[in-house]
Image (cartoon, rainbow, N blue to C red):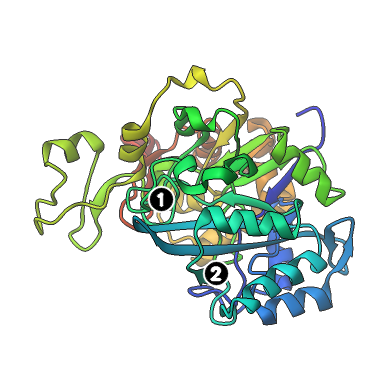
Amino acid sequence: MDIKPVFADLHIHSKYSRATSKNLDLESLEKWARIKGIDLLGTGDFTHPVWIEELRKNLAEKNGILYSKTGFKFLLTGEISLIYTQARGRSVHLVLLAPSFEVVDKINDYFDKKKLRRDYDGRPIFGIPAEKFVEDMKAISDDIEIIPAHVWTPYFGVFGSESGFDSLKEAFGSQLHNIHAIETGMSSDPEMNWHIKELNDKTIVSFSDSHSFWPWRLGREATIFTKADAYKDIIDAIRENKILGTVETDPAYGKYHWDGHRACNFSSSPQETKKLGGICPVCHKPLVIGVENRVEELTNQPTEGNKNRKKYWKMLPLSEIISVVYSTGMISKKAWNVYNGLIEKFGNEFNILLNVSREELLKEKVDLLLVEQILLNRQGKIKVIPGYDGEYGKAVLNEDQKKLF
């Protein structure tokens, strides 16, 4: 890259969201974002009354960017869940970006006037139709950005098999023009989204949806901007499709890439699912249809039809690579020793994943097999057994690599 890229992860959660670490505070987020190589981090959960006060107390606002005491940058973000009936059951998750505490206060006041609770979860659930919600947010401020989250996941992605929608138009109606971007989610990558005509004029972004600060979660997917000195820099890049690109995990690594039943320990490719008539051979109930299958179902153009394609880097988190090479858990002492040693030598994880050369790695006496896996990972060539029905995919060494080790 000719310019210094800005790595941003704008979809995360705080300790006030369900199923998150109670240590997920600003200090931990900043520490691990720096280790990961993230330059701009979403705050997450700005609808939560306690978290927003912690943000207000500890971060200084300037031009829509929030700064910690050490100068690390945050952006006001949140995720909401809309579940409602519109001819049939509908469900969608949306990521919200906001330009100031003042605007966030207006958003939260909007919910409060409707007597909708915000205090029970960092990602609250509201029964507001998506079209109406976007219209109401734009009435508060045109600077609010609404991004459909992890658009292909079965239950709450706008294209998901269980969401009730088959298109953005169906979900957002007259407000479709106010949807400028979509988030890929871990189980899809930009190329899969290039098959959908409706996305030809939308920016494709990626964020982690992290529920912890650990480096195999935070920043596992990210969007790369040219600058982040003001909120306007981020919004203009999203609305005008001027991002540099995205960091993606292999879609097979995602929790919903293939079809299957976790309880039955069964998964299947779209082709196999068709042969099965969509029925699980173990419990004889309908399979949860995953992302790859759903993309095939909704595909309506070749990838060349999308002329606004941006570069993306497909790779797994460094901790995952270390875990596979040494046949150890990502939280094991061995994995941490290797990870910390690499960070000490090369600065941050994104630098290791994207930039450090084979010669530099070998010069620092990094194990040859680990060097090979880091370089293969950079090329998106790590083998992954697909995830399904809430189970992450699993990275593996192929047989000839195992023999080398």
Secondary structure beneath label 1: loop
For the residues labelled 1 and 2, the Cα–Cα distance comes to 17 Å
User: Which of disc 2 and disc 1 is earlier in sequence?
Assistant: 2
Position of residue 207 relative to residue 246, above or below, is below
The quarter of the picture where the N terminus appears is top right
User: Is 38 displayed left or right of 249 in the figure?
Assistant: right
Visible residue check, residue 218: no
Instruction: Tell me which residue sits at (44%, 51%) in the image.
Output: 157
In the picture, residue 242 is in which quadrant? Answer: top right
Q: Is residue 31 above or below residue 8?
A: below
Badge 2 crowding class, 10 Å Cα cut-off, few under 14, some 14 to 19, many 20 or more, is: many
Picture coordinates of residue 126 (x, y %)? 51, 69
Q: Considering only vertical position in the picture, is 178 above or below 372? A: below
Q: Nearer the viewer, residue 82 or 49?
A: 82
Residue hosting label 1: 153
Q: Residue at x 49, y 63 (%)?
A: 82
Indicate whether 56 appears above or below 75.
Answer: below
Q: Label 2 amino acid?
A: Arg
Give amino acid for label 1.
Answer: Thr
Check the image and name the residue furthest to the top.
304
Q: Residue at x 74, y 64 (%)?
A: 30
Residue farthest along the right direction in this orientation: 62
The residue indicated by pointer 2 is 123
Position of the C terminus, as image quadrant, is top left
Q: Would residue 87 appear left or right of 190 to someone viewing this image?
A: left
Q: Position of residue 17 (x, y in %)?
A: 55, 74
Q: Position of residue 376 (x, y in %)?
A: 51, 33
Relative image position of residue 293 (x, y in whole percent)? 30, 38
347 sits to left or right of 216: right
At a point 63% along the width and 54% down the height, the residue shown is 135
